[in-house]
Image (spheres, rainbow, N blue to C red):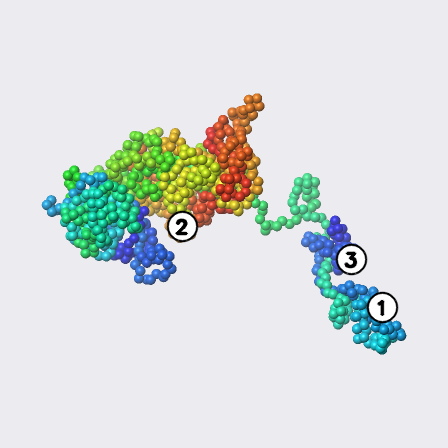
Amino acid sequence: MPIVSVGRDRLFAALEQTYTDQEFDELCFEFGIELDDVTTEKEVMRKEKHMDEEASADEEIIYKIDVPANRYDLLCLEGLAKALRVFTGKDPIPSFRVSEVPASSIQKMVVKPETSLIRPHVVCAVLRGVTFDEARYSSFIDLQDKLHQNLCRRRTLVAIGTHDLDVLEGPFTYEALRPADIKFVPLKQTKEFNGAELIEFYKSDMKLKKFLHIIESSPVYPVIYDSKRRVLSLPPIINGAHSAISLKTKNVFIECTATDLTKAKIVLNTMVTMFSQYSSPQFEVEPVEVVSADGKSTRYPDLSLRTFEVDMAYVNRTIGTSLEAKEVSKLLNKMQLYTEVQPDSKLRVSAPPTRSDVLHACDIAEDVAIAYGYNNIIRTVPKSHTQGKQQPLNHFTDLIRAEVAMAGFTEVVTWILCSLEENFKMVNREDDGNTAVIIGNPRSADFEAVRSSLLPGILKTMGSNKDAPRPLKLFEVSDVVRLNSKEDVGAKNSRHLVAVYSNLNSGFEVIHGLVDRVFEVVGIRPAEFDKVSGTFSGDGYYITPSQEPEYFSGRQANIMCAGSCIGSFGIVNPEVMQRFDIIDPCSAVEMNIEPFLYL
Amino acid sequence: MAATAVEEALLGHLQKLTISNSEEWASSAGFDHNLVKDVVKSLHGFGYVEAETVKKVRWVLTAEGKMYTMRGSPEVQVFEAVPAEGISAADLKGKLDALVYDVGFKTAMKNKWIQLAKPLIIKKVESVKDEVRNLLTAIQEGKEIPDASINDLKKRQLIERRNETWFSLSKGPNYAPKRVKPETDLTRDLLQSGEWLKRDFKPYNFNALGQPTEGGHLHPLLKVRTQFRNIFLEMGFEEMPTNNFVESSFWNFDALFQPQQHPARDSHDTFFLKAPARTIELPEDYLERVKKTHEEGGYGSIGYGYDWKRDEAEKNLLRTHTTAVSSRMLYKLAQDGFTPKRYFSIDRVFRNEAVDRTHLAEFHQVEGLVCDRGLSLGDLIGVLNDFFARLGVKKLRFKPAYNPYTEPSMEIFSYHEGLKKWVEVGNSGMFRPEMLQPMGLPEDVSVIAWGLSLERPTMIMYGIDNIRDLFGHKVDLRLIKSNPICRLGIK
């Protein structure tokens, strides 16, 4: 969830009310945001630099507020204050207007077809007569940062550029050119760069280097020019220095370039609705005509309301209330939703451009519930009767776990994620590329693979518990995963039992005894050996000498049941023990228990 | 055996008499006093005898002192060796031991018993009394002698100091003429012979711990899991099959109406797979409905308005929540024909996040859901109150929240008596119609659901502040072996 930092005193000034921290926390709780921290700028700095310094009393108090990830209108002080003022009944729902501009004097943005190769969409708007002060200005910049981080997916989907319109001359063009052909002085610089040089230059810039990948490998870069071929911006990297906005800027030109048009519109609407309160006339936005490559013209921003027909019965049924349409209408007004009561117990609910999160009547029902107060809703209980039931495999697993614990073994819970080395090499096994599930984006070697066997995890636990009293007897019953093309996803879990014994002696016979005990409790008897044919009867289990690389030669066996090998046990190979840093001899067993589930 | 003889003799003696000095008694009875002392200590421990320790300083003769009690003191020996007519020094020296001569001559001279009448040594008095010898004999007999004489003899190294300890003994409260050794345990022999009736039993040390039990131990995290499972089962919930860690993006995200550009679908949060990289099979009809709902909405929704890509949906991952299984179950329920259901699961989920003392890249998610016609937020609040009350959490309140696949969504807070504040204990909500209706569930069917982690309540319950002590190879085995039963769900 995004966290928005706002100055407490400025926020209270905007709300025209002061609160204690606790009162404000309560208000946040009701509204569905969270007062995450109360701090000061200097306190934050001290924490970052680990300084122990007394706070002075005159430091500005900062509220850090956690807002829902789909409420872009709450990402700045202006939006938060407006939403809370409407919620507490101080203000009516703000209404935003697109000004009437004759076709002859409207600002135009012409989109060139090449932009489809890299970043096909652009939407624009103008804010006139804006009055900035330092706080407003920094809020304006912060909102762009917040939007870039969240909705714009770190500028991949949408990038915002804001410009001083008074130093530019339209019509504007949105183009895509070869990097070498784009030359301009970027923001905060004095030297001219071409597109390729710029990428090199920003590779050492902590803030901008993470956006370079979005266009770096493209043969053409997106760029916006005015009619005098002055560069407004090279989205999504940097704006030009020429049109930089300042505290003195009066008329702001906003452009949002995008790979996702829906999100570009939301971003533009968020920018203009939040800051049109500082423009003149207030809440009015001047449109820009965007002429797409196919010659189609569209005026932006689109500040129209989106209307939903909502059934009163649906609202009451969803929340569990029996509210009247009139009450619901009042509640929705607190949430900035216009509501008209229709004759047949239906509501016409309109969401303003600030509420792009409203997609369905269920979003409206939630707003009714929030405004009504979640904690005022009467508790009820679902009526229908259902039966409790366990998954057979989990039920069976619990019985096996209890039996193994009763046999003197102590349970551990190890990680499913592991390194490839642990999964294979450390237990003397080859990675045939056909066994383990491999993770594509591990943060570290610890998360390279999903275990295809439980043995490495429990051996690692042994190695980490050298000081534990001997004998050490550990076990785990859990899932391993192996590649399996018969499954829809291409991999399958299976439930395994692993147990290890370690002492001054190997305890091979202890592990052998556990194997026999497991068969005893699942009700499978030892198979009969027929001396004549030299084979075992098919109905029981038997063990047969094996050659598994993780075990010691001559002291290991495969466990055979119903004609197939379901596991093996033995003294752990000393090479393997050494790799896991195990100092005492030990024996282990690992077997699949799923074949025992239904007998 | 010698001790047994001492014990018998001593108890026998005490039957009628007392012993004022155990040492004397020992020497008269012919026992070693040290052995007697050991026997006394043991008998006293069981109350057979009353023993009072007597400590006394005693003077005993040195070897030299002992010699003089037999031969007389050196000065007397010298005196005796001087004939009436006198004797030359050389002759006198020749008659005596060198030591006797040296000491005796000087002392006899000092005592003015003899004198030098050159070249002879002659007696000066008729006869002498051997005081030293008398004193030594008196000490040997244990008689008191004056302190001045003691100092004298000590200086001459004829006597030395001894600290003597002995007991004065009488019958103790448990006196018996013959000791019966107390038994430490009731054995089969004692029981079957009937001897247990006659024997005394040694008192038990009730302050010591008993012997540790044998047998194994179940892991505390899974003990908590068992209790959670029982609570769900008691509430009529059916367990979902969650033994599929590998999942497609489709079931993990798309089916939940989670848009393809959602931050949770970033590689920063999710483990995507290199093998198996793509899912092999998806239900085609359903996939079309999901695609359409994301792109343009439907079922009363306006959708997200973006270009939905099958390629994204086919990407395999390690499930980030067990809700991926819930979506499979609800889809199956819709195909099989809807009936009311309550489902739960508790199993592993994976997040590609930074790990620390309280977070791992994998943890257990506890999830419950109710699927029925006409469920409300009030029902969700009711079910949550019931569920958490069974966990012992009485005071709940709910905060509006955002979750891509639930609407309304509520964060669950409980009042923590220790911290004196509200703490978040879980998340909940009603699944969005955009998730349920493409599955084919009837329009009036709602699903209320909630989730929490298994690790957090376990850590709080068992006072564990580092998750690695509980989970993984660096586990604290002592913690696993010694922890109380989990009482969740016991009222």
Marks 1 and 3 close (CB-CB < 8 Å): no
Q: Which percent across, then down, holds residue A481? A: 42, 35
Q: What is the chain letter for disc 3?
A: B
Residue drawn at point x = 38 percent, y = 42 percent: A442
Q: Is residue A526 above or below residue B128?
A: above
A534 horizontally vs B110: left or right: left
Q: CA distance from mark 1 to mark 3?
A: 39 Å
- For label 1, the SS is helix
Spot occupied by residue A446 in the image (x, y as percentages of width and height): 42, 43
Q: Chain of mark 2?
A: B
Q: Secondary structure at mark 3?
A: helix
* Residue on which disc 1 sits: B95
Mark 3 neighbour density, 10 Å: few (under 14) some (14–19) many (20 or more): few
Q: Earlier in the sequence, mark 1 or mark 3?
A: 3
Q: Are marks 1 and 2 in contact (CB under 8 Å)?
A: no
Residue A172 appears left or right of A512 = left
Q: Position of residue B487 (x, y in %)?
A: 47, 44
Q: Are marks 1 and 2 on the same chain?
A: yes
Quarter of the figure with residue B105: bottom right
**Nearest to the observer: residue B295 or residue B435:** B295
- Does the CB distance between marks 2 and 3 fall below 8 Å? no
The residue that mark 3 highlights is B27
Q: Amino acid at mark 2?
A: His
Mark 2, mark 3: which one is toward the viewer?
Answer: 3
> Mark 2 highlights which residue?
B416
